Image (spheres, rainbow, N blue to C red):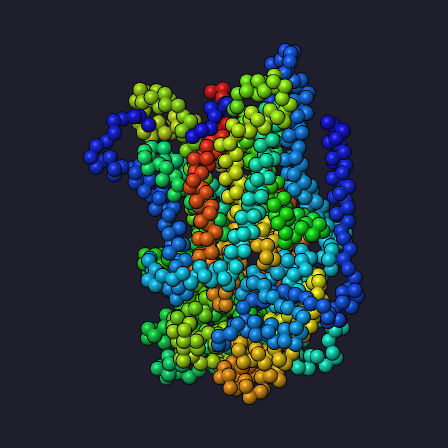
Amino acid sequence: MSRRAPASGIRRYVNAVNLGGLAIVVLSALPLYWMIASSFKGPGEISAAPPTLVPKAATLGNYAEAFVRNGIGRYLLNSVLVASVSTVVVLGLSFFAGYALGRTPLRGRGAIMTALLMLSVFPPIALVVPLFLLERQLGLLNSYAGLIVPYVALNLPFAIWIMRNYLAGVPRELEEAATVDGAGPLRTVLTVIAPLARPGLFTAGIFTFTATWSEFLLALTFNSEDGHRTVPVGIALFTSQYTVPYGTLFAGAVAATLPIGILVMIFRRSIVSGMTSGAVKG
Amino acid sequence: MALSRRTLLAGALAAGAGLTSGCAGKPLDTLLTQAAQVPRTPATLTWWVSEIPARNGPVVADLIIRAFQRRHPHIHVRKSNALSATDANRAAVTTQLAGASPTPDVYLGDTTWPAQFGSNSLALPLQTLLPKDFWTSYPAALRRVSEYRGAVYALPFYTDSAFLFYRKDLLAKHGRPVPRTWEELLRTARTIQRAGDAAYGFLWQGSVSESLTCNVAEFLADAQAPVLDGAGRVALDGAGAERAFALMREFTETGVTPSTVATYVEADSQDAFTGGRGVFLRNWSYAWGNAADRSASKVAGRVGVAPRPGFEGAGPRGVSCAGGWSNFVNPNSRHLGAAVAFARFCAGEEAQMILLKHAGVIPAMEEVLTRPEARAVGDPTLTRVRELHLVARPVQTPYYPQVSKALYTRANAVIGGRATPAQALRAARADIRTALEGRAL
Amino acid sequence: MTSPAPASRRPAAEQAGPPPAQAPRGDGPGRVSRRRRARTGWLFASPALLTIAAVTVFPVLFSVLLSFADVRLEYGGFRILSLTGDHYAAVLSSPEWRQALFFTFGFTVVTVLLELVLGTAAALVLERLGAARGWVLAVLLLPWALINVVAAQLWGYLFNGTYGGLTWLFEQFLGHQPDILGQPASAMGAMVVVDVWKTTPFVAIVVLAGLMLIPGDVYEAAEIDGAGTWTTFWKVTLPQLRPIMAIAVLFRILQAFGIFDLPFVLTQGGPGTATESLAILGYKTLFQNLAIGRGAAVATTTAVIVISCCLLFLRVFRTQADEGGRA
């Protein structure tokens, strides 16, 4: 766009761009507000027609019920464990693989990158059957490892893309200097490259954590036993005596979304730069 | 480099071949021997149970567990969160069982599950562990659906029957009797709706789920139209079947039933009725307790119960699907003896009396319903269940889920006006045939 | 942002080609041979690649085997009874599968198109926002960060036939209570709305990243030539954005084809089978009907379609990119 002088008067605030920004905020946030408000509505009010915009009789009962009766505390713990471990393992493995694919003369790395691209969006339904039967034989169903291993494998492709594109931009001279000093390849990577990779690691980390936190199909199939359920499965399978317990459900949902929401808002710049390196340079 | 790649591939193929050959399970006899003995050592059982509708305060499942633990102090029973919606419930527990999970040890399942679960080795066959006269205490229809190929997979717990619930005050206000036929119900409902006393006339369940299959089976039985014949082949045809489907369409076409009924499960129809929005409701017996509860229902004290209407002319009245929930034993359980003991306790007199006194469901043990306590509870569904004409859904085939899907998918199209009754019947017939041949997805 | 300067701005297809030739390096202390560096590369990459292969490649091959097998579950194990092509015959002739394919395909096309348009519009707005950009971006990312099943439950509540907020809103305009999730057309529409709400942020920030990389002099040149707003956008901005949009579109198409969470929670594939995606069909076949071989056939056909689309897209885009480069 041409860089005209900034508008004055009312056009400074009321223009297409600002209205667009307002529209974005309203459309994104309104349903979320609805969810949060509903989590404070009692059972009578939540199924009232016409619906109320602001809860008339706000109550914390839904939160109590979500934690006490539906056990969302347990599901949150499971999710934290599975997501954290998966993320750490993914970061470790993708760092080295990204380095290898971006900075070493690996034969066939082009084909590997294309294959990884396709695998990163592979439909999980195709993996559910064989993994289910395999894990059943190995006794890995309803365990933490049974989810962590597939999660690591499914999130590695995208993480490797991000790390590879990120690391490819590090100047060669730094590495060569370390090699001249007599450092082996492992030492070089750990002392020279790793400290510089932090932003890329943050990006890959936030993507992996978000993806594993929200993953549903594998968690539903492998860890359906109550003690090992993760949050998405727990929320999808919330129980109650007669009706879908929306109030309790939203209370649980707010509890489940808060960690991710906060992480995403803190690391939003990482996410955008991750898209940059992932999409643009790739 | 090339060598190590080849070695990798070979190793993987070998591993794959090993896993592919499958794994032999334990022979059935071993399992049954274990199941026959109640262990003396402490054991913890997990009971997969969806919330049993309670008539008054206490959680019914807890009462039963406590009673069991008084009898067997060294066996501890834990509840596992299960869903109230039967289809999602089945998928969740099936996934665990098919995954050879040792828990849950005992699970509460719909009475329509034995054929499918038995044929897929998801439940332990129990007939050798039961006394010869076990089934004399329970309805014959229940025995039929609990067996598959002569093996018993489900032990009785409670049955569900469907009734017509109605607003006493609205009928009195307009001077109308409780309808005995569908035609009369349509007329009465329209009158009351036109007078503005209720938004909806007749509420039932039309969503694409097992709930609709129950309604369809009932309407078909009203019209005396079978789904499968005695040999298990599809027999869904004829004027009677078309009349049943046409009735479902008439409800939504005339506005007696809202078009949103196409998304209703039991909970939605119950919500609308207890919110005062409907004149008539078809629902299971638990609806009485819920509608009479002043804290949950706006129409408490104004609700009456009657058997479902029939069609004008010849034909049965008071048809109800033989529903209900029974206990199954997980063959992978590590405490088979304790599990079987618990399932049998739930079918026994003590547990059945607890159900009678505290649950809004009908205990499976018939004798319990004749006791004075049954009348004292004041729940008309308990006392009127004997007037009902129970019909079974076509559950004797392990392909029941696909058969049910054929029925509820096509019926839902009729309700929504997307297919004529004749078209829907033709399509349902073809779908059921495909399902019975095992060719349905 | 602290990302390093971009090494290149070549589009994905070109990067996926053969690696660029390396200038021969002279000998001397610290000069590691090519072969040794390649071996280091393999050592570093193999843990990750092996993990991926173990969980994706071999299970997929196993799945293909299962799709040709008659599998039976037994007490504590499973057995392959025989090999048969019946499953594929049943799947390909099944009207339910065809309906699922048709729906999944249509859903993918509609949502990706909508997200592309809305996402680009949002990106344009974000680029021009001044101080407010950080906050608007943060709010925009919240739907993206929301767990899929939570979003589905939320919108299921909004669309609820009896007491949903959106149902009430529509009722004010239509005069009667609409049955949004109960009629196939509106149920499909509802699913599109939820998916667009949830995933447009992803497209928006990809396009935003692309917008920010367009050099300012390109715009100045356009202004000097006297181009208006719309012409500038169409003839200058869009062509620059094409590679990025292509990647975003590719990702979205492949993701949308495997959609599961949303229909599972929002409609369970209903009404009827109107919103039954291929993944939902596969899941129901596997875990509601316990037809393992058949479910594997559904899953394998889905995977084949996805991979073919991906390869086709890359081939088409590679040709386009070459032509664009030459122009």
Q: Which residue lies furthest to the bottom in this view?
A: B372
Query: For this rendering, which residue is in front, C306 or B94?
Result: B94
Q: Is residue B227 visible?
A: no
Q: Residue at the spot x=69%, y=79% of the render? A: B135
How many numbered marks are there?
0
Is residue B220 positioned above or below B13 on the image?
below
Q: Residue at the spot x=73%, y=54% of the render? A: C78
Indicate the quadrant where residue A12 lies. top left
Q: Can residue C230 be seen in this view?
A: yes
Indicate the quadrant where residue A184 lies. top right
Apparent side of residue C190 relative to residue B90 in the rendered image (left or right): left
Question: Could you tell me residue B164's position as x and y percent?
Answer: 48, 77
Is residue B92 positioned above or below C92 on the image?
below
Give the quarter of the figure containing the N terminus of chain B: top right
Q: Residue at the spot x=60%, y=72% of the render? A: B65
Indicate the quadrant where residue B147 lies. bottom right
Is residue B268 positioned above or below A155 on the image?
below
Apparent side of residue B60 relative to residue B119 in the rendered image (left or right): left
Query: For this rendering, which residue is in front, B95 or A60?
Result: A60
Q: Residue at the spot x=59%, y=54% of the render? A: A228
Apparent side of residue B185 relative to residue B348 in the rendered image (left or right): left
Apparent side of residue C175 relative to residue C263 in the rendered image (left or right): left
Question: Could you tell me residue B405's position as x and y percent?
Answer: 58, 61
Question: Could you tell me residue B249's position as x and y percent?
Answer: 47, 67
Query: For this rendering, which residue is in front, C291 or B132?
Result: B132
Give the quarter of the figure containing the C terminus of chain B: bottom right
Q: Residue furthest left?
A: A9
Is residue B35 positioned above or below A167 on the image?
below
Question: Could you tell me residue B277's position as x and y percent?
Answer: 38, 71
